[in-house]
Image (cartoon, helix red, strand yellow):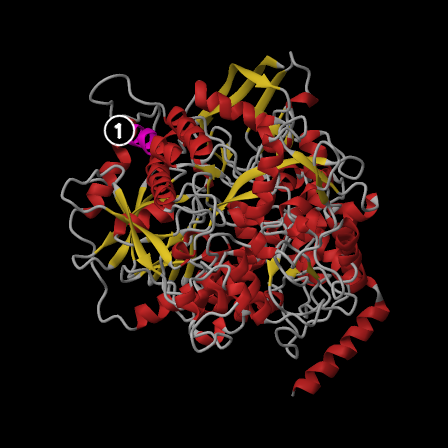
Amino acid sequence: MTYTARLRVWRGDAAGGALTDYEVDANEGEVVLDILHRLQATQTPDLAVRWNCKAGKCGSCSAEINGRPRLLCMTRMSVFEPGEVLTVTPMRTFPVIRDLVTDVSFNYAKAREIPSFTPPPDLGPGEYRMKQADVGRSQEFRKCIECFLCQDTCHVVRDHEENKPAFAGPRYLMRVAELEMHPLDVADRVAEVQDEHGLGLCNITKCCTDVCPEGIKITDNALIPMKERVADDRYDPLVWLGRTILRRGSRQARE
Amino acid sequence: MIETERHEYDVLVIGAGGAGLRAAIAARERGLRTAIVCKSLFGKAHTVMAEGGCAAAMGNVNENDSWQVHFRDTMRGGKFLNSWRMAELHAKEAPDRVWELETWGALFDRTPDGRISQRHFGGHTYPRLAHVGDRTGLEIIRTMQQRIVALQQADHAQTGEYESRLRVFGECTVTELLTDDDGAVAGAFGYWRESGRFIEFSAPAVVLATGGIGKSFQVTSNSWEYTGDGHALALRAGANLIDMEFVQFHPTGMVWPPSVKGILVTEGVRGDGGVLKNSAGERFMFGYIPDVFKGQYAQTEDEADRWYTDQENNRRTPDLLPRDEVARAINTEVKEGRGSPHGGVYLDIASRMKPEEIKRRLPSMYHQFKELADVDITAEPMEVGPTCHYVMGGIDVDPDTGQSRVPGLFATGECAGGMHGSNRLGGNSLSDLLVFGRRAGLGAADYVAALGRRPVARTGAVDAAAGMTLAPFEPPAHGSGENPYTLHAELQRRMNDLVGIIRTEAEMTEALEHLAELRRRVRDVVVEGHRQYNPGWHLALDLRSMLMVGEAVASSALARTESRGGHTRSDHPGLDPEWRHRALLTACVRDGQEDAVVPRIAVERTERAPMREDLLALFDLTELEKYYTPAELIAHPGAGPQGGTA
């Protein structure tokens, strides 16, 4: 079944732009990215849209459809009414480069600020032993395809440019959780996640979880447990005491 | 003169998939200043789409596994056409490369005793694929991306700058390699996709890691990036391609709805117990075991089903034959009228495993079918059919260092040739890119260290490259010009229809005529708008590579008058031992009448190096006799004084 889809696409660049109306053929089973590709091939060859795998695995084609952050390749046309006008706009939280393409370098900068996996000094390659139940927690977070939709939707930065320097965003707070829950990582990032990466700014509204195309429970499984670890670290006197003694012990052992 | 941004590095890696990242890590760990250039954002390359796993004979699930068994499986999968040295290095080094990833933070699925779990896959004797559900490629690329970040953090701690020794140039396309007056690599020229601004790299060593060519075909599991850039860049710089007739059609791509046709369905579905059925409900693969594999696969459904739990006493299911065999079988079933409603066959896991188990083992397949096709794979079978997936052919390189015949030009991963022979086994790609990515990075580092002086690019080369890049903005000499999207669609249709799974001399000849016509039309390609993030312009430039690669595939396929692996000629249906020891090399024609836009290519025959004796001795003589000429087997320890015995 072929019908005429009605699209309103944001066209422009950093200097400004506007929504432009288009009518394009749509066929059964197609996704929004198919429609944009047909628009490129038949009407607007220079329409800028980022994409790669077209299978929901690479996280390149992030944009907003009727204001909701989505992957263009995983949004089927059939979820909308045939006569409905679809408004397609670039992710709002990042600076526009052109049309639907935004400058996502914020995310790559934040990625560099998280201390990397720190392997146990006494284990060589091939000696790692971990239980499936123990790696499962971090594996959930490693499903992340870095589409940055969670970063886009997060209200801490969505309309608050001023918060960006102090806030890593859900994707990278989850990266901290992933490393902290890695069974063999030996670094401690708990103090840092609060002080340097802005975990405290998150007030668990779960917007990030709602838009995650991988269905990762970012808030429940990553952010809230990290908040609990911060709370334990800061406010539980027994933990504080135990850690102080341990820290002293390991320092002596090293010396 | 056109304004161009300039950078100087020791090693320039083109491509940021697994092979490129592994090469860059190796070069940087040797202390060289290294740049990575990639067409997409960092971390989005095609490697993310690898699903099933990474083959490495660690022996975690079946301790009988060893590098020798892996080597034998790889050679058999490639029908003995593989570079045996690459297959040897690959089988020996893959386990170390996988374990190394764990020390960088990778989290593979585990065995009950806490080691890396390994799954079954087509053509592999033992469960051998390290995996993470069905998203293994994502895990591998993310791990190496994070390793690069870790190296940048170390550089930051030391120099105050993250990018002082290792920098990623994302969304940047290289259009030309620069060479010096003696033909040695001197750098590369390209443009930033975001701005359209030009960029020039000065580098004495370039590692090509640009992946495959699938975007020349209509039905493909490959993304837009797979336009054969590395193949074309290497040809234009003077390197050879080898084995370009061998293109792998993965047997199981989605066939419906049309917009997702070609998207990959992992072989892991079959590795974990899924079976292929035709419209009559028959498990048809039992009828397609070829002579060379007779005796190695189960003959009955009962034996095949027992094999999943007891591999010592049963033979494997023919659903897990190498990919070329399965793709051809599906093709035949559909052609003979036993296909599914949308022109594929059925892949059934729903009747063989509990829904929760399917969701746990194959989460992204469940998700993909649910979201894109409204199919619940835990309740009904999938419809699948062949899709263009991988090119075995590629840049001809030295097995140990990855260097091409052009000094300073290295290649690794899918864009390099030789490793997989005429057909790649599933799971051998992720291990290939780890093993040979590292080797190419080290090869480039050694080359740079031994170099007396930095080669300087030929004068005028940069201006010529810039002029070529801007040509699509010029109105054509006559007519209204060609639309790049139209040309691309036509190229894809011709390649799909004429140079697909089953080929004939007449079809290859016709394909080459169409390609010649497209080569003429691409000169008149014209694009609208300006240089800032302009997909029409990007495609117009990528077409140059796709056309060269198309001609290389069709010309090689025309020359090889036999059927083997990813090359099936219905007019020459048999395996011919005289073709086993021959290779086809593709090179640019240098006759003074060059076509600067799409240089012409020529294919010539060469002989393959004979396999080292100790490796040859790993096979039974009776098996080798199915592939080799008697004269080649005289040195085999099992051979009698007169040569071959039966």
- Residue depicted at x 57% and y 24%: A88
For mark 1, name the chain: B
Residue pictured at 44% horizontal, 69% vertical: B633
Residue A121 rendering spot, x and y as whole percentages: 64, 77
* Residue B490 magenta: no
Q: Residue at x 73, y 66 (%)?
A: A183
**In the rendered image, the vertical position of residue B641 relative to residue B313, given as above or below:** below
At label 1, the amino acid type is Arg
Q: Can residue B193 be seen in this view?
A: yes
For residue B381, which quarter of the picture?
top right
Q: Give the range drawn in magenta.
A: B512-520
Q: Which of the two residues, B275 or B52, is positioned nearer the viewer here?
A: B275
Q: Name the residue under label 1.
A: B520
Query: In this rendering, would B418 be left or right of B459?
Result: right
Asked whether the viewer can see residue A58, the reply is no
Residue B501 rendering spot, x and y as whole percentages: 50, 39
Q: Determine the main secondary structure of the stretch shown in magenta.
A: helix
Q: In which quarter of the image is the C terminus of chain A?
A: bottom right
Vertical comparison of A114 with A252: above or below? above
Taking the spot 39% from the left edge, 32% from the top edge, the residue there is: B507
Residue in front for this viewpoint, B269 or B15: B269
Give percent across and percent down for residue B527. Answer: 33, 25
Q: Is mark 1 on a helix, strand or loop?
A: helix
Q: In this view, does B119 lie above or below B612?
A: above
- The relative height of residue B108 versus residue B393 in the rendered view (above or below) is below
Foreground pick, A225 / B625: B625
Q: Where is residue B153 drawn, in percent x and y?
A: 51, 63
